[in-house]
């Protein structure tokens, strides 16, 4: 992708050109993560960051195991012990 120009608008908001929004599949109201790296602003959709973390963690979860079901079972057991 070519370099695109954006601008800061009132309140310090960053206005992204439509080409960048389309390239990142961003719509109004989507949450993005912003980070300053070596004097540059890196912007990425939150959903992509979450998907990347889930992918990395998947290798530590055995096939057929649901971590959410295990967590719920642990919480119910803890509540029963109270």
Image (spheres, rainbow, N blue to C red):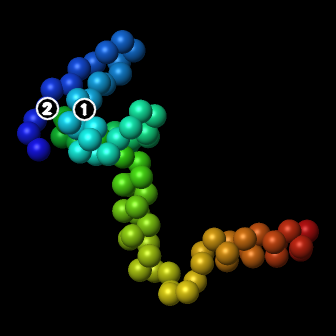
Which quadrant of the structure image shows residue 76? bottom right
Question: Where does residue 18 sit, x and y in percent of width and height?
Answer: 24, 32
Q: Can residue 35 be seen?
A: no
Residue 17 horizontal side relative to residue 54, left or right? left
Under circle 1, the secondary element is helix
Front-lying residue, 55 or 82: 55
Mark 1, residues whose alpha carbon is within 10 Å: few (<14), some, or many (≥20)? some
- Element at label 2: loop
Up the image or down, 40 lies above or below 60; here it is above
Could you tell me residue 41's position as x and y percent? Answer: 24, 36
In the picture, the disc for residue 4 is 2
In the orientation shown, which residue stands out farthest toward the top?
10
- Mark carried by residue 62: none
The reply, left or right, for residue 35 in relation to residue 54 is: left
Q: Residue furthest left?
A: 2
Which residue is pictured at 91% across the width and 68% down the height? 82
Q: Residue at x 41, y 48 (%)?
A: 46
Point out which mark residue 18 bears. 1
> Along the line of sight, which residue is nearer the eye, 37 or 31?
31
Give coordinates of residue 64: x percent, y percent.
55, 86
Depth-wise, is mark 2 or mark 1 nearer the camera? 1
Which quadrant, please, contains the N terminus? Answer: top left
The picture quadrant where one finds residue 79 is bottom right
* Residue that appears at 36% across and 12% down: 10
Expressed as whole percent of the image width and height from the top left, the position of residue 47 reads 42, 52
Whether residue 71 is situated above or below residue 6 in the rendered picture: below
């Amino acid at each position: 992708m070519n370099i695109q120009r954006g601008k800061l608008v009132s309140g310090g908001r960053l206005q992204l050109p439509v080409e960048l929004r389309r390239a990142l599949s961003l719509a109004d109201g989507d949450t993005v993560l912003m980070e300053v790296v070596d004097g540059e602003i890196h912007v990425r959709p939150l959903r992509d960051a979450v998907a990347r973390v889930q992918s990395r963690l998947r290798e530590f979860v055995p096939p057929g195991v649901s971590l959410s079901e295990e967590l719920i079972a642990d919480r119910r057991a803890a509540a029963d012990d109270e």
